[in-house]
């Protein structure tokens, strides 16, 4: 029974996982990223547009990532350079992405998906699925075992330490946000590549769900992506709809769990110390 | 702690008066102007007549009372959500949960309106009251979690939005769906629970115009909010907690209690947007009826500088934009997404302007 749910769990969890990793980089650098939703959406759009235009899924992937990066750059310029409120900017970007994609619709043609790799025992999935665990481990090592990661985290934890090393907080924050745009863009590309087309507002709150996973996973790559698999499993259960549990309950489970974790009933959840604070 | 110094630092602005005026008032107007200008350029490059486009924009909201009625009808829910966001913002709280709160409130109004058959003078206040209580309850939860556990209200209001969407979807598809209908909606509320349309009161509006008395409630709400914020003790406490929490604590105000009741009040006002929809327009609860009013409310509050009268003006402007977007879509075939994109850019522009002036004040 449970085994049957593995394919749909993987398919649901992968875009969330990429977006959540992106969210972790941005939030670890001290910038709240509510724009994940918009970055995923524009990534999906860019993938379909690029694949349709060029005929190559790889170019589509690149264009999707590029679109995600462009929105991330906008987020970075507004929040880091102009000190705009990070929450409102994120919401503005989501509305912007929804508007741009709706304006440029329709994209009626079906497009090819990214190549699937057949592996023994596991099955056939897009290579993006296989890449996620590797990226998760790499992100963990990068953030917590290297000087590079220490500096990125310093941008979100202790700006004094960064200043003492005469490193620019601005630079690290730009980097964190751009990485989130790149990863959320890949998540969006995967979403569009699996269903082969783009529909209006197709991310349907997945960016916010990824943000919930970031918080649920205590801003750490390993637990964050694990949370995405848990959330993906809840969605797979909802789609399978076999045990007569109202789908809506399963649907809201991740959000309820996140609220519980945030309140501190389960373990401790601690955001980066300077998250959302722009003053130096 | 030197209280006088603290208060002075709060109210002191380093920007000169004229620069402040430019940033706060001229630049939003410039942004809107720039938006329309760039829209015209886009339209021109689509190979359509840009002058025709501007003619439609200018006439869209003002060609007749009927058109202007639609503008005010579009503006009504935005007045409520804008006020809700602003009240939270004034006390340093960020209510992104208006969307969820207005759904919960709308359902409460619809439920009472369906199940009780009372004369109008009892049922209408009862529906509005229960909707406000429901919205307040949904808003108070993140407020309480913030006050008691320090959990950030932004995250919790977002989470509660999604929980509200799921709950509403469940109720309206599984429990209270109108029998024999595929549409996820409840049966109609009783005649006596309805807020009258203004078309039935004045002959200048055609019968088809949806503008209803909830717009008058919105105007009343603007005045009440202004008086509340400016002249009452609670309004003072709310603003003080938002501006200088240490001063507030020193003055004997409990910032935690303020956090809870402000979020509740904000939720109650956001709930009125749901009332306007259910009791004033559709007369039933339809699943996902709101087109992001809770989020547009953030833009409205920003543009209105968190001043109730400014919010009324900003809401009317957004109501006009929605009307224009629809007309452009119908008459010229230009997708509405153009205006959503413009709205997103406007929000980003406004927060950047605010960020710049805040940065200048700090240094």
Image: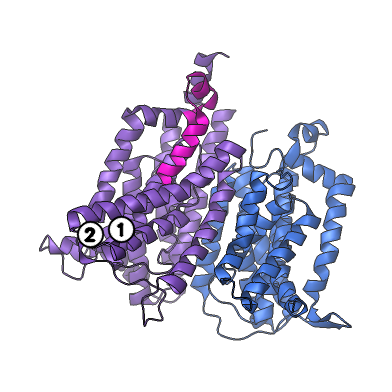
Chain colours: A blue, B purple
Segment colored magenta: B241-267
Residue A247 screen position, x and y as percent? 57, 71
User: How busy is the neighbourhood of tag 2: few (under 14 within 10 Å), some, or many (20 plus)?
Assistant: many
B325 above or below B228? below
* Label located before the other in sequence (2 or 1): 2
* Residue drawn where x is 59% and y is 75% of the image: A244
Residue B317 shows in this picture: no
Q: Mark 1 lies on which chain?
A: B
Residue B335 screen position, x and y as percent? 43, 73
Q: Which chain carries label 2?
A: B
The secondary structure that dominates the magenta segment is: helix
Instruction: Please give the residue where the numbered disc 1 appears in the rendered image.
Output: B276
Instruction: Please give the residue where the numbered disc 2 appears in the rendered image.
Output: B195
Residue B217 shows in this picture: yes
Q: Does the magenta stretch include residue B263?
A: yes
Residue under disc 2 on the same chain as residue under disc 1: yes
Q: Is mark 2 on a helix, strand or loop?
A: loop
User: How busy is the neighbourhood of tag 1: few (under 14 within 10 Å), some, or many (20 plus)?
Assistant: many
């Amino acid at each position: 029974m449970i085994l049957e749910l593995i394919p749909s769990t993987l398919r649901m969890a992968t875009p969330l996982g990429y977006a959540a990793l992106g969210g972790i980089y941005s939030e670890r650098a001290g910038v709240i990223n509510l724009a994940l939703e918009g970055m995923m959406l524009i990534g999906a759009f860019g993938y379909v547009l690029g694949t349709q235009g060029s005929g190559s899924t790889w170019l589509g992937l690149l264009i999707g990532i590029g679109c995600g990066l462009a929105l991330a750059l906008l987020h970075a310029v507004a929040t880091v350079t102009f000190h705009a409120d990070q929450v409102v900017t994120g919401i503005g970007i989501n509305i912007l992405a929804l508007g741009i994609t709706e304006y440029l619709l329709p994209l009626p043609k079906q497009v090819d998906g990214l190549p699937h790799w057949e592996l023994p025992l596991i099955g056939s999935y897009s290579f993006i699925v296989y890449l996620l665990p590797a990226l998760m481990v790499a992100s963990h090592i990068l953030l917590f075992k290297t000087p590079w990661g220490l500096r990125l985290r310093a941008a979100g934890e202790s700006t004094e330490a960064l200043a003492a090393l005469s490193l620019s907080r601005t630079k690290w924050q730009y980097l964190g946000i751009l990485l989130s745009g790149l990863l959320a863009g890949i998540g969006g590309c995967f979403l569009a590549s699996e269903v082969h087309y783009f529909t209006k507002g197709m991310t349907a709150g997945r960016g916010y769900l990824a943000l919930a996973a970031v918080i649920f996973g205590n801003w750490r790559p390993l637990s964050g992506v694990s949370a995405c698999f848990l959330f993906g499993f809840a969605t797979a259960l909802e789609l399978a709809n076999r045990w007569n549990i109202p789908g809506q309950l399963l649907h809201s489970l991740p959000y309820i769990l996140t609220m519980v974790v945030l309140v501190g009933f389960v373990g401790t959840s601690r955001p980066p110390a300077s998250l959302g604070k722009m003053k130096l | 702690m030197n209280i006088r110094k603290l208060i002075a630092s709060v109210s002191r602005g380093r920007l000169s008066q004229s620069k402040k005026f430019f940033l706060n008032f001229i630049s939003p107007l410039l942004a809107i102007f720039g938006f329309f200008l760039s829209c015209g350029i886009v339209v021109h490059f689509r190979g359509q007549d840009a002058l025709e486009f501007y003619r439609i924009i200018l006439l869209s909201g003002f060609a007749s009372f009927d058109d202007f009625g639609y503008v005010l009808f579009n503006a009504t829910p935005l007045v409520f959500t804008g006020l809700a966001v602003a009240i939270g913002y004034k006390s340093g709280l960020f209510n992104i949960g208006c969307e969820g709160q207005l759904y919960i409130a709308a359902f409460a109004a619809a439920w009472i309106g369906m199940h009780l058959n009372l004369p109008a003078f009892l049922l209408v206040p009862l529906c509005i009251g229960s909707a406000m209580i429901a919205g307040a309850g949904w808003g108070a939860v993140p407020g309480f979690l913030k006050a008691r556990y320090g959990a950030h209200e932004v995250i919790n209001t977002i989470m509660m939005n999604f929980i509200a969407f799921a709950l509403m979807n469940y109720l309206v598809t599984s429990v209270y769906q109108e029998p024999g209908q595929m549409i996820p909606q409840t049966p109609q509320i009783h005649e006596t629970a309805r807020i009258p349309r203004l078309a039935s009161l004045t002959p200048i509006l055609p019968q088809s115009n949806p503008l209803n008395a909830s717009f008058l409630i919105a105007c009343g709400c603007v005045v009440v909010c202004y008086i509340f914020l400016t002249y009452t003790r609670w309004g003072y406490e709310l603003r003080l907690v938002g501006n200088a929490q240490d001063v507030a604590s020193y003055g004997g105000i409990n910032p935690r209690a303020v956090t809870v009741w402000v979020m509740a009040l904000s939720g109650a006002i956001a709930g009125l947007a749901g009332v306007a929809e259910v009791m004033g327009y559709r007369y039933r609860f339809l699943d996902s009826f709101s087109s992001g009013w809770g989020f547009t409310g953030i833009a409205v509050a920003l543009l209105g500088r968190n001043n109730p009268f400014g919010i009324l003006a900003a809401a009317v402007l957004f109501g006009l934009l929605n009307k224009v977007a629809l007309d452009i879509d119908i008459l010229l075939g230009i997708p509405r997404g153009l205006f959503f994109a413009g709205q997103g850019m406007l929000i980003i522009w406004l927060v950047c302007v605010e960020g710049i002036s805040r940065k200048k004040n700090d240094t």
